[in-house]
Image: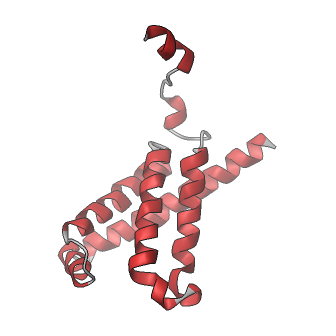
Amino acid sequence: MKKNVEVGAFILRVMLGITFFIHGLDKFQGGIENTAGWFSSIGLPSFLAYAVGGIELIGGLAVIAGLGTRIISTLFAVIMLGAILKVKIGSGFLGGYELDLVLMTVAIFLSLKGTTILSIDSKLPTRDPKTVEESV
């Protein structure tokens, strides 16, 4: 059963990464200045467009590779929460924020669970809490 959960988390991780990567790529290919202008028009600082686009683009690739999955997924969840509350909530669930809510939910799952199968994170050394406590 544990292997099935890992395979499922792997599939979610890769699809979340691809989705955010493509959205970030679109922001830069479409002219990040346009996105910055749109952010300004809805009352957000224009520099946030660069931050969001960068997190989506670079973070998407990192999540696909399984590098920093928990941290980047948390950032993705925050971005989706902002998109829902600032832009999509007025449109309602259908045709509004349903996709953003699903992406946020997947991101929250991965930020809580992480994923080890086929990930760079699983190859990195980890700290053993007992060792850290003993050295203090």
Give coordinates of residue 101: x percent, y percent.
55, 72
Return the residue nearer the eye: 34 or 76.
Answer: 76
**Residue 78, quarter of the rendered image:** bottom left
Give coordinates of residue 131: x percent, y percent.
52, 13
> On the picture, is 90 further left or further right than 114?
left
- Residue reaching furthest to the top: 134
Image quadrant holding the C terminus, namely top left
How many marks on residues?
Answer: 0
Image quadrant holding the N terminus, namely top right
- Residue reaching furthest to the right: 1
At x 59%, y 88%, the residue is 94
> On the picture, is 94 further left or further right than 125?
right
Give coordinates of residue 72: x percent, y percent.
43, 51
Q: Work out whether 127 lies above or below 118.
A: above
| Visual colour scheme | secondary structure
At x 32%, y 64%, the residue is 52
At x 40%, y 82%, the residue is 87
At x 34%, y 58%, the residue is 55
Give coordinates of residue 81: x percent, y percent.
46, 68
Q: Work out whether 30 lies above or below 19.
A: below
Q: Work out whether 75 lies above or below 30.
A: above
> On the picture, is 55 further left or further right than 2?
left
Q: Work out whether 40 lies above or below 4.
A: below
